[in-house]
Amino acid sequence: MNLDFATTALLANMTLAEAPTLDSLSPEEARLAYSDIVKGLPDGPDSIASETTSVPVDGGAIDCRVLKPVGKASSVIIYYHGGGWVFGNIDDYDGLGRHISERCNAIVVLVNYRKAPEHKFPIPVNDCYAALNWVNDNIEKIAGARLPIIVAGDSAGGNLSAVVAQKAAREKGPKVDLQILAYPVTDGRMDTAGWKDDARQLFLTSNMMEYFWRHYANEDQFSHPDASPLLADDLEKLDELAPAIVLTAEYDILREEGEAYAKKLEEAGHKVVYKDFKRQIHAFLALAEVLPAGFEAIDWMNTQIETHFKSVEEFDAIIVGAGFSGMYQLHKLRQMGLNVRVFEAGTGVGGTWYWNRYPGARVDIESVAYSYSFSEELQQDWVWSEKHATQPELLEYANHVADRFDLRKDIQFEAKVASAYFDDDKNEWLVTLEDGRAARAQYLIMASGVLSASKKPDIPGYDNFKGDTYNTGAWPHDPVDFSGKRVAIIGTGSSGIQTIPIVAQQAEELCVFQRTANFSTPALNRSLSDNEIQEIKNDYAGFRKELRKSRGGFTSPEIHVDRASDTSSQEISSRFKIAWDSGLLPGFFHSFGDILTDEKANEAAQEFIRNRIREIVKDEQTKEDLLPNSHPYGTKRPCLDTNYYETFNRDNVSLVNLRRTPIDTITEKGIKTSDAEREFDAIIFATGFDAMTGPLLRVDIRGSQGKRLEEVWADGPQSYLGLTVHGFPNMFTINGPSSPSVLTNMIVSIEQHVDWICDCIDWMKKSQKSRIEANRSAELEWAEHTAQIADTTLYPQAESWYVGANVPGKPRAFLAYVGGAGVYREICDQIAQSGYHGFEAH
Ligand code: N01
């Protein structure tokens, strides 16, 4: 016998408690004993709404309890509880009903059919059928729409479901769309193999089964098809019979009964999905709270329901997102001969550069470096017009790539992914869109971006404002004209700092609400000359090679690795001046090797930048307020700007320092701070993103055995290499948490991840493996390594989105790998060369 540990523990507890077997009790005593056991279990999710209604039936009335999940349900499951037709009721099954409702996103109707021996066969059958009719007649009222109807039940309830489904088909009654039978009783002859096998009688014995049958029906009724659905002789003729999902438990006296019924239905031409749950005993579904395999069964049921009701397209790989990562991933997998589908929420390609259309948006890494390297023809043909490309030019580039490589034919636009569930039986992902469409694939690649989950700011009165509101991360597609308008902007990160100078030129008045003064240095943007471009193109491959080896994938005139503390103050000033004048993001990082590890070195850089701000800004108070002094330089993402500090010298621009006068609330007309209420025509929110984890957790991702990513990451994300997560086989996350991603030139990191994923999939194919998963110990070791090197830096000192500090309640963890993109690439390559050390594949 090979039971799982939870089952072994349950049976051991029962033995030690020396509880009487139910067949030694009167029906009334058995009911009380069972209710007592169930009372000890947790209540089930309280997010489920519950309403009990009395439903008239022949000779009386029964209670039906309607359990509704949060949000829009996709089906109605009429659930007939188990208990040998003798015990059990809707209170005993309330917890299970709630779990089924939540996990299957279904309205569950629990039916309190009358029990034997007071109400013998066929009364329970008739009550259950009456409940089906009641649901069918009142479905609009119960569900708000004509949702599919499923009959389901376990044990004796499975028997009743099978019988009700047959009856509905035979009598041309209400349409049953699906029947779910969990370890059902199907055969009253009581002579299958399980009846003679002690190993199959661990929870439910032959004596108990006999007790139930004898209380339920007279002997001459045992073989009646309404009592023994297996013995129905007209199954071939029941064209309307609902497709069946049948599950059994390996160590259950009823296993053969369920198996035989599934087989008979199939032979009669009906659609059946059958699964025997290994190492499980009778009632494991009903006891899900103590036997976790019960939850696995519910999730399996859910996958079967989803698969059944959706027309599911099949692919080799599904990619979520058609930004720069999704596009390259699609191109490369297609070149390998895979059948791929990309789902993209927007109407076009480009990801970040599709959504962030705010005025002034442009990349703060040099365009010649922030572009694909995978195609020599592409990089030779494309001509960047400026040192830092604007958002429209980047979007044009993305569209050019999509056209050039004919990507659009495999991208489904306006397709927002709602959920992705892993199917352990098939080693496949079932991906469902918000509009209900679904697809399956062996591989799921989350190319959903790292700064794509725009964050609603936690400001009181957010919805009060009656004027126009804008979010930099989801800017309208049509140009916005702020001429003659009084405009407020909240947020002074990269987005705010780029928006402010442009809006200031248009608006009648611009008021900047700043909570944290940020470090920004001039971008010194300019047109690129033909000569400059040609010089890069003469050896583009060599240029890319250098980027790949580097720490951040950035360009920079010179990279110094010596310590500031070993350097004269004159030399320090001279290097910082070069950094300031370079107009490059990594300028200051590359000035010394210890800018991000030594407080003094960092303080020197901070002071250099503060002095430049002091020189630029004229108004004394504004100058003081703009000086960043809450965090070391670089520990919040530094910004590159065009005339940001100069903009505060304009007459139409003002600054509100929220550290001195915090926002009380947003009002109908404007923004009320502790000192005044200011009125505006428009408010721009440049308040950032739920970075790195947000785009992944906004999809309901459930891995092996129904494990939810949200639960697994409740205390912070854990990932092996930022590429894969233990418990989530065949899923890859491009630029995922604990990879270098946001600390680097994203395109360099994207290409590295895509190439690695493709090599891995190719290896899987060649070694004929269907499932790969990071093992837990490798994941932990990687987490330890990433945390340990982050702790050697100044990064953890800042309240930044790098550590999740900008989202209330988000667990604190440094979200990227600090060790450098070049080093990281070496590690990933070594893992691949070792035959994927740290992974389990079969
Ligand atoms: O977002 P952010 P972002 N009340 O989180 C403030 C990349 N990017 O969209 O610092 C008042 O940086 C918040 O204040 P505080 C780049 O990696 C790149 O600007 O939390 N204020 C902060 O000032 C960047 O880092 C490019 O105190 C509130 C601002 O809003 C990342 O995207 C361009 C607030 C948010 O700044 C995110 O940049 C743009 C509240 N309740 C973005 N909540 C380029 O390549 C938040 N704030 C050029």
Image (tube, grey):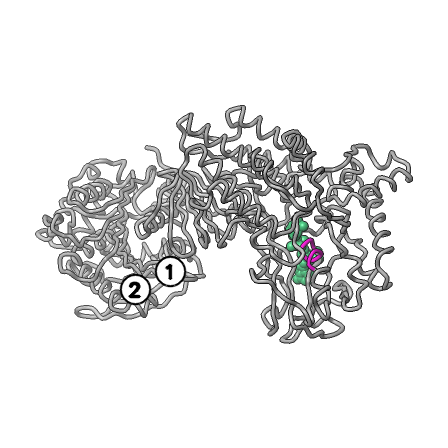
Examine the rendered structure and indicate whether residue 224 appears above or below residue 264: below
Q: Which residue is at 29% across, 38% downward?
A: 250
Q: Residue 46 at what x, y percent from top left?
A: 44, 61
Q: Is residue 369 magenta?
A: no
Task: Using the image as rendered, state which of residue 689 and residue 711 is in the foreground.
Answer: 689
Q: Which residue is at 66% across, 29% downward?
A: 542
Q: Magenta region, mostly helix, strand or loop?
A: helix
Q: Residue 148 at what x, y percent from top left?
A: 29, 59
Examine the rendered structure and indicate whether residue 16 appears above or below residue 486: above
Examine the rendered structure and indicate whether residue 563 appears above or below residue 285: above
Mark 2 secondary-structure assignment: loop
Check the picture and name the quadrant holding the N terminus.
top left
Which residue matches tag 1? Answer: 73
Within-10-Å neighbours for mark 2: few <14, some 14–19, many 20+: some
Q: Which residues are magenta?
A: 493-499
Which residue matches tag 2? Answer: 146
Mark 1 secondary-structure assignment: loop
Q: Earlier in the sequence, mark 2 or mark 1?
A: 1
